[in-house]
Image (tube, rainbow, N blue to C red):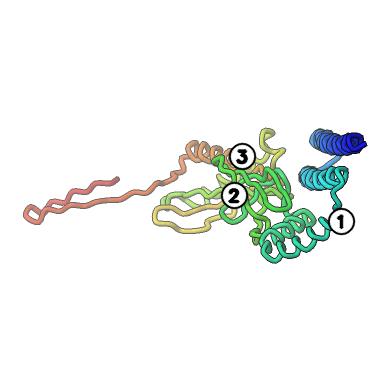
Amino acid sequence: MQSEILQSEWMSGLLSLVLAVLGVVGIHLIGRRIMRWVKSTDRLEDGRRKQVITLVQTARWVLDIGLTIVALMMILSAFGVDIVPMLASVGVAGLAVSLGAQTLIKDVIGGILILVENQYAVGDTVELGIAKGQVEEITLRATQVRGLDGQLYVVPNGEVRIVSNLSRDWSRATVDIGVAYEEDMDRVLAVLKEGVAAFGQDPLYAPDLLDAPQVLGVMSLGDWAATIRILAKTNPEKQWAIGRALRKHILALCEREGIVLPYPRYEVSVSDAASGNVWSDET
């Protein structure tokens, strides 16, 4: 009789374990199917697609933890363990732990707010303090950001105070060009305006531009050059590629038009008091 009861408990525990494993596998299969559909469909905008991917990943993480806890309780109950006092103890212990785990609670609340407000999503390029790069994963506790140099930053959500999202809705490429003071600035501005207008109509770059590039004019006067700023409004995360291409285009344009782009130069003069001769050297 006792062996039959033990066998029944083992069968119940094994069934609970199997159901838990099947539930986790099912969650991952459904999540993978949804992710595949989200990445391949044309019905979603890029911003909405990133948000759905983030929500799916977070929901899968939460369901895995919740299903594991429920399966553990079912297994204990199958072996005759009264889980009601355990749940009450867990509640009391949870209250005690919560008083000492305020940072963790703050991180979870921050993660919920990030997801609800859609401050950023997986795939966005963000700046969170010293962490700057592409968001790889968001959980309720932390955000993982992959930097340009390959470093992986793990930022607790409770520590996120100011979010700089560099890939939301639209971006802007800023290009500063230093021009020699000897140049005719009116001519330089006219050449640059004509050149960037042609760049904006180039079929290779036009799809990534939301507006025609603008030459703002002389922005500052440096030690050896006058700085002219050019702005180009682009699709999200295209500002860096457009900026590189625009700099290359302007460099070729200035070389073709004979516009001097100076570099730092120093002139050193040496005099001989006896002979009165003066030698100068420019570097």
Q: Residue at x 81, y 56 (%)?
A: 86
The quadrant where residue 74 appears: top right
Q: Earlier in the sequence, mark 2 or mark 1?
A: 1
**Mark 2 secondary-structure assignment:** strand
Q: Of tags 3 and 2, which is closer to the observer?
A: 2
Identity of the amino acid at label 3? Answer: Ala
Q: Which mark is residue 84?
A: 1
Residue found 84% across the figure and 49% down from its top: 81
Q: Residue at x 93, y 36 (%)?
A: 1
Which percent across, then down, holds residue 135? 67, 45
Q: Is residue 262 left or right of residue 282?
A: right
* CA distance for labels 3 and 2: 17 Å
Tag 1, which secondary structure?
Answer: helix
**What residue is shown with label 3?**
241
**Viewer-nearest of labels 2 and 1?**
1
Q: Confirm or deny contact between disc 1 and disc 3 (CB under 8 A).
A: no
Amino acid under disc 1: Val
What residue did someone put label 2 on?
132
* Tag 3 and tag 2, C-beta contact below 8 Å: no
Crowd rating for badge 1 (residues with CA inside 10 Å; few <14, some 14–19, many 20+): few
Q: Is residue 253 above or below residue 102?
A: above
Q: Quadrant of residue 283?
A: top left
Task: Work out whether 240 lies above or below 225.
Answer: above
Give the image location of residue 21, x and y in percent: 82, 35
